[in-house]
Image (cartoon, helix red, strand yellow):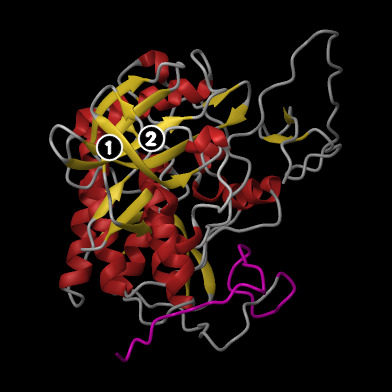
Amino acid sequence: MSQERFIRCPHCGLPHEATETVCPIQGKAIEVPKRKRGSIAPPPLEPVWKTPIPDPDQRVEAEDSPSVTRLFGHLIDDKYRIDELIGRGGMGVVYRAEHTRLRKKVAVKVLLRGHTAGSEAKRRFDREARAAGSLGHPNICQVFDLGELPDGSPYLVMELLEGRTLAEELRIVGALPIGQACDLAAQVLSALEAAHETGLVHRDLKPDNVFVTKNGQAKLLDFGISKNVIDENTLSLTRTGIVVGTPYYLAPEQARGERKIDRRVDIWAAGILLYESLTGMLPFNAENYNALLAKILTKRPAPPSKIRPAISPQLEAIVMKALAFEAKHRFEDASSMRTALLIAKDEPSREIPLEMDDVVERGGQQVRNTELTVSDERPTVALTAQEPVPGPDDPTEISDSFVHADIDLKLPDEKK
């Protein structure tokens, strides 16, 4: 999807593409204000859409540009020798390197030239280094050092991780075994708990930002758009009317572009991440950005047991509470969600009373519930890996947040 100009709708308050003439949520006409001569168009949405996950064995392209290979074999700050490229994105590259004095393998992340001092990318880069470097948690990727190359390009030195991101894992294997999904989510919640205790809200939790090491340890990455909610000057979630975060994992209050947010946006994203790990599907999906925001704001996700019947009532209740539309009805903090998750994983027969005040599904009908315990009746409609994923006109549609029919739904064999 190309980077297009977005405008703030005067009716629903959401950002819509500039070509929209009618609000897709309220159906009212949008009057696009004329740009004043010499005015600067707002910066593009960041990020615009979920990018495909490359094959882990082909992460590095055969033809590397000089800007990427220029550091091979060089010493940075007289101690970090750059050995090889292990990954790159639109703003930066990550190298495998060695601290020559300590003979320690590290990863060096370098911001590409063009993202100079004063740019938003540079500010995000510095914020990531300060946030991750100050936490020192086993489930957060450690940052050891920060500096600048002679040409002014900033770099940071991180622990070298062996494994792959959760996004790559889900793309390859589909839904995870239930125990593994719960364990990884619990580790991520432990990392969030540490961040929240210092006042940091991650704001961009997603499978791409969760690294799974070869021994099964989860490492939370990229605090680049994190905010310290203790500092009143950093509470703004938007910039020039633009929503910050990855669209699939935005909480409703983020989708509305609210200026003040708290740690419960991370609880929502953790719920999305757990839902996706358990089912191999996103609870909200759409053909374009505006439609996706509309679904997040107007629809509720299908209970995950409709996709994977083996999900216990306890676990389903936890997922749905994390995805409560109103922030006040979600888990109050990462610690309480993590505790409930570990109980559901280790003691599946134990009831966990969870206060909820949201629309939930029971027996195929939507009802408003004020208290849901894990012993309540669950929906009986289910999809299996052999059944087609219903589309928007299918009478057996499990949710308004359907996935594209060409997605291969892969579920583990629960009998193993």
Residue count near mark 1 (Cα–Cα under 10 Å), binned few <14, some 14–19, many ≥20: many
Report the magenta residues as a range.
392-416
- Reply above or below: 360 against 38: below
Q: Position of residue 368 (x, y in %)?
A: 47, 60
Is 332 in front, or is 4?
Answer: 4
Is 352 in front, or is 404?
Answer: 404
Say what amino acid the circle numbered 1 marks. Met
Is 187 in front, or is 81?
Answer: 81
Task: Provide the residue designation for mark 2.
Answer: 109
Q: Is residue 27 magenta?
A: no
Task: Provide the residue designation for mark 1.
Answer: 158
Residue drawn at 38 percent across, 41 percent down: 95
Residue drawn at 16 percent across, 71 percent down: 346
Please give left or right for residue 137 compared with residue 181 in the image: left
Label 2 SS? strand
Q: Position of residue 361 (x, y in %)?
A: 48, 69
Please give left or right for residue 378 compared with residue 405 in the image: left
Q: Main secondary structure of the magenta part?
A: loop
